[in-house]
Image (cartoon, grey):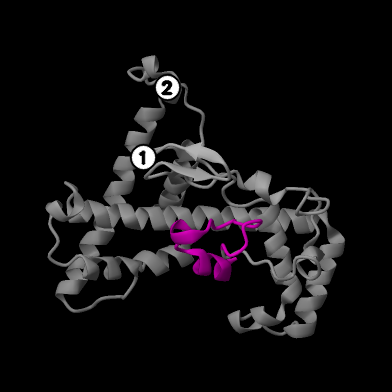
Amino acid sequence: MNIVLRTFVGQRYNWNDKKGIHFSKLTRFFSEQVGSFVLRDYVTLLRWLDWGGYEKAMRKAAEETDYILSGWLRDHKQRRKLKDEQHDIMDMILSRIDGATSQDFEGFDPDTVVKSTSLAFISGAADSTRVTLTWALSLLISNPHVLKKARDELNNHVGRNRQVEESDIKNLVYLQAIFKESMRLYPASLLLPPRESIEDCVISGYNVPKDTRLIVNLSKIHRDPQVWPNPDEFRPERFLTSHQNVDVEGNHYELLPFGSGRRRCPGMFLGLRLV
């Protein structure tokens, strides 16, 4: 979370900092609620009834999050006036929308756009990285022979006297294979965000009307036995042999943890470095 916050809003918290802990809990809460089954989303007659108190809880969390983001935005604007910018992502967004009005954003004021964009980046980056690391570590613990190979590779290329640097990653091919296999089995999001067709079209013989929403099932694609032999097994070696040329950057449709095309994850390269 600290790496993400430093990148996007120039903030850093200590482990026992109440504000940092609270913000981390808020982003985790949002992620959990987005994936929750809420009856009123499926039974329209119950829209007026906040069964389970989900809407009340979300409104409270939204107000608290907005209060934090508003403080960060206020600080950034103040520093810009003093010519003391940090050159983080929020500074870049503010530079891009200088002089913008509500008419430029279809009725939303520029401050709301800056805060919502920043929150989307922060919550998406922190939660997806956390989930990926958790799965990768659990897979390593469950497969001691893989963990031993990873440790041997680190000892050979890095040694025991220093930490791993970003420049080392290109030499740690087995470690790269481990994370590719982790993201194949357990991508941070099992379903890609919905796509919507903007016109009638035909795809593989199927008539797809305009405004059709498509949800891509990554779990099904990543475990297709026609593409991945023994798809449920954790085998990083497959990315050093049969699938050695398959990457996770959206160029190969059998492995899409970050999506593909113009709507792929904008934080893909940052996420890969962090992991």
Answer whether residue 235 is visible to the viewer in this image. yes
Tell me if 85 is positioned left or right of 266 in this view.
left
The C terminus is located in which quarter?
Answer: bottom right
Residue at horizontal 60 percent and vertical 56 percent from the top: 256
The correct choice, above or below, for 10 with respect to 129 in the image is below
Tell me if 100 is positioned left or right of 14 in this view.
left
Q: Which residue is mark 1?
A: 61
**What amino acid does circle 1 point to?**
Ala
The correct choice, above or below, for 238 with respect to 155 in the image is above
**What amino acid does circle 2 point to?**
Arg
What is the quadrant of residue 140 in the picture? Answer: bottom right
Residue at horizontal 70 percent and vertical 57 percent from the top: 182
Tell me if 101 is positioned left or right of 211 in this view.
left
Query: Please, what secondary structure does the residue beneath circle 2 have?
Result: helix
Residue 9: image location, x then y, percent: 34, 65
Q: Which residue is mark 2?
A: 40
Residue 154: image location, x then y, percent: 75, 77
Which of these two is toward me, 166 or 248?
A: 248
Which of these two is toward me, 44 or 203?
A: 203
Answer whether residue 15 is visible to the viewer in this image. no
Toward the right, the furthest residue is 145
Which of these two is toward me, 207 or 181?
A: 207
Magenta residues, as a range? 250-275
For label 1, count other residues whose C-alpha is less than 10 Å away and answer few (under 14), some (14-19) or many (20+).
Answer: some
Toward the top, the furthest residue is 45
Query: Please, what secondary structure does the residue beneath circle 1 have?
Result: helix
Q: Earlier in the sequence, mark 1 or mark 2?
A: 2
